[in-house]
Image: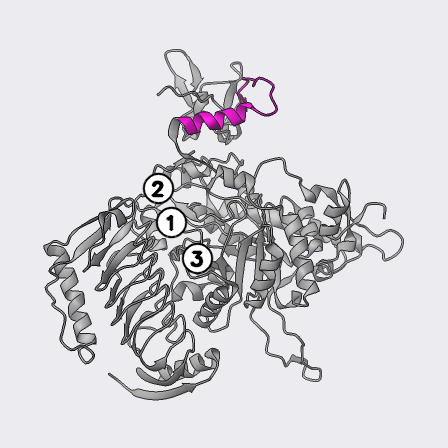
Amino acid sequence: MQDYLLPRYKVLRDADQCVRCGVCERSCSNEVHKVDEELGRVIANHRACVNCQRCVVMCPTQALAITRWPQVGNGSNNWTLGAMQDIAKQAQTGAVLLSSMGNPQPYPLYWDHLLLNASQVTNPSIDPLREPMETRVLLGSRPDALKVDECGRRVMSKMPPQIKLDVPLMFSAMSFGSISLNTQKALAMAAEELGTYFNTGEGGLHKDLECYGEHAVVQVASGRFGVDARYLNAGAMVEIKIGQGAKPGIGGHLPGEKINEEVSQTRMIPRGTDAISPAPHHDIYSIEDLRQLIYSLKEATRYEKPVAVKIAAVHNASAIASGMARAGADVIVLDGFRGGTGAAPLRIRDNVGIPLELALAAVDQRLCDEGIRSKVSLVAAGSIRNSADVVRAVALGADAVYCASAALIALGCHQCQDCASGRCNWGIATQRPELTRRLNPEIAAERVVNLVRAWNHEIQEMMGGMGINAIDSLRGNRLMLRGVGLSDKEREILGVKHAGE
Amino acid sequence: MGKTVSVTLGTAHFAEANATVREALSQNDTVEVNGVFAQRYLGCAMPAGKTLRIHGVPGNDLACYLDGGEIEVFGNAQDQIGNTMNDGCIVVHGRCGDAAGYGMRGGQILVRDGCGWRVGIHMKQFEGKRPAIVIGGDAGSFLGEYLAGGIIVLLGKPGRHLATGMHGGVIYLRHPIGEDEVSAGLVQEPADEVDRTVIGALLRRYNECFAADLDEPLDESGEGFHRLRPTTVRPYAALYAN
């Protein structure tokens, strides 16, 4: 059948700069570049380019840039070139379109409509370079009342299990299988260095990472891959994954090609079989069933570890979150539709779920109204792009955030959305040994640590500007936010005043 | 059998009941648990070398994450026994409820009578570990859904939607289903010599476990069984286009 698909990108090569060294050819697992000795130049198979920009970064003479394929559509706002290309692909294959990373569609980015406050004259700002500035966060349930022996300076109440984060940020779930072991190891090392946590995703905990268990959140999802008593007790917190922002209502599916020996050992399934995590947990049909799973995990970990439950931000998130808190979850994780994924059906990724900002504000408000907010911690996930997003998320009600895309970008990811192919040139979303060894865990960890340290200092600067010296005082403090360019309804849901009010 | 001790649970809350049982298990190899009134999670993550003998009605999630221990229930069991169990054995002198053996990776579950819905969902096998479930009576719908490995032997009749999404393992049926009821991607065929050896060994275990309950032991030859197996381990290989 004739393939009607057009290339998506075009490789621009500056002939004056190119020295035909072949670095681009060796960089590209998609086999875009080829040094043609007979022609005496480097040729490109544009069609294979995914715009991961590895060759652009690696080219020693800056001879390369990638641009969009210059073909124009007919000018229709409806039948765009992209819409027609999707149809061509499906007509060719009869398949469900697959993509990766988070929802890239131009839905409102509420973060960019929320401005932060700063003190002037009164309640003066605090200089974090001179004054103590607390960014430590404890996640877990909190007791209704705290009994303190003031003479002995001891807490008398029995405290529920909590985990301590030195920075208000953890690395979100990415399984070994969806990402390389080197990538997971880099995040584990960074988490240890920063005093925070990485998350195993539903892929088990590789034996080489067991030493980072104190900084691991171990995930339990519908496929139960790699889950046994040892795994549950190896981590600092257990997380039940109900849903994921990038693909609400859809399960996981790691294709057999990615189940190599190491992944097979860690997931405890045979090599080469598809690893299918069904969309529903077949044992959870109600909040009461969720409670049963939560408490089975608490029993299995002797009530020594908090249990988190992660859901995708969907229409009824606040009612669901209320149920989750009552079901015994210690931490609620809300994942918005811009959160990344190693693979998701494109139509689901682009059309299902709601923006994190609205869900977060609604959930925090609902839990406060019902008087159960302090029973749980709230973690916001789904494309936190910078430190200002962290501050906004906390002011909207989050205790902390989960962050994955930004951490991967720190490692070299250029968001080409081709993770599912397993040919990641940056050595991140691949299991091919010749690619995974491109990512050195020590150097990669240093990049992530640098990023988070920089963010944390920026967070301290922003808090200081508001006259706030502890991140606990910022949580749910929506007076520190003002909306611009938002409707009354949007501001009502976000719980913020308009700028100028 | 090592040291044995008895505990009585009565109406204690499950957290308290499990603490009592764990305490008893720390000092003894076998614990007789009496007066059980629907306490959940009994035998949770219990390791090899430990045995629970349960009298009364254990609650949901009996033997979740079971890690090699042995559990015998003298009566019926409720929902979701052997959730994500890793190894060990559960014997039920009666019937069990829904979702038994969810995500089970090793060990055996033997149920004298029937079972509820969604039993054996997402069972899997790995290297030397090949979990097995034997159901003596009829099964509810969705038996063996998403089955990725292991063995299910069903002596009674299955419900509807048997083994939809199955992509590994095998189900042995004493009562074959109609060809129109065989889910897409699966094939039903008479058990062969190798199958009969596997079935025979499990039926022998069944006879041993339930000798006192049965009028006469089952025929252990494995004759007359059919097997249901997937035609591929990659049922969705062609579903997606990048």
Which residue bears the numbered disc 1? A276
Which residue bears the numbered disc 3? A281
Q: Within 10 Å of the Cα at label 3, are there few (<14), some (14-19), or many (20+) other Cα atoms?
A: some
Instruction: Name the chain under label 1.
Output: A
Choose between A118 and A142: the one closer to the eye: A142
Tell me, yes or no, whether dots 1 and 3 are on the same chain.
yes
Q: Within 10 Å of the Cα at label 1, are there few (<14), some (14-19), or many (20+) other Cα atoms?
A: many
Q: How many marks?
A: 3
Labelled disc at residue B236? 2
As drawn, is B203 to the left or to the right of A319? left
Question: What's the residue type where badge 3 is placed?
Answer: His
Tell me, yes or no, whether dots 1 and 2 are on the same chain.
no
Q: What is the x, y in percent for residue A383?
A: 59, 45
Q: Within 10 Å of the Cα at label 2, are there few (<14), some (14-19), or many (20+) other Cα atoms?
A: some
Can residue B182 be seen by looking at this rendering?
no
Instruction: Name the chain under label 3.
Output: A
Q: Secondary structure at mark 1?
A: strand
Q: What is the x, y in percent for residue A481?
A: 76, 50
- The residue positioned farthest toward the right in the image shown: A121
Q: Which residues are magenta?
A: A62-91
Residue A81 located within the stretch drawn in magenta: yes
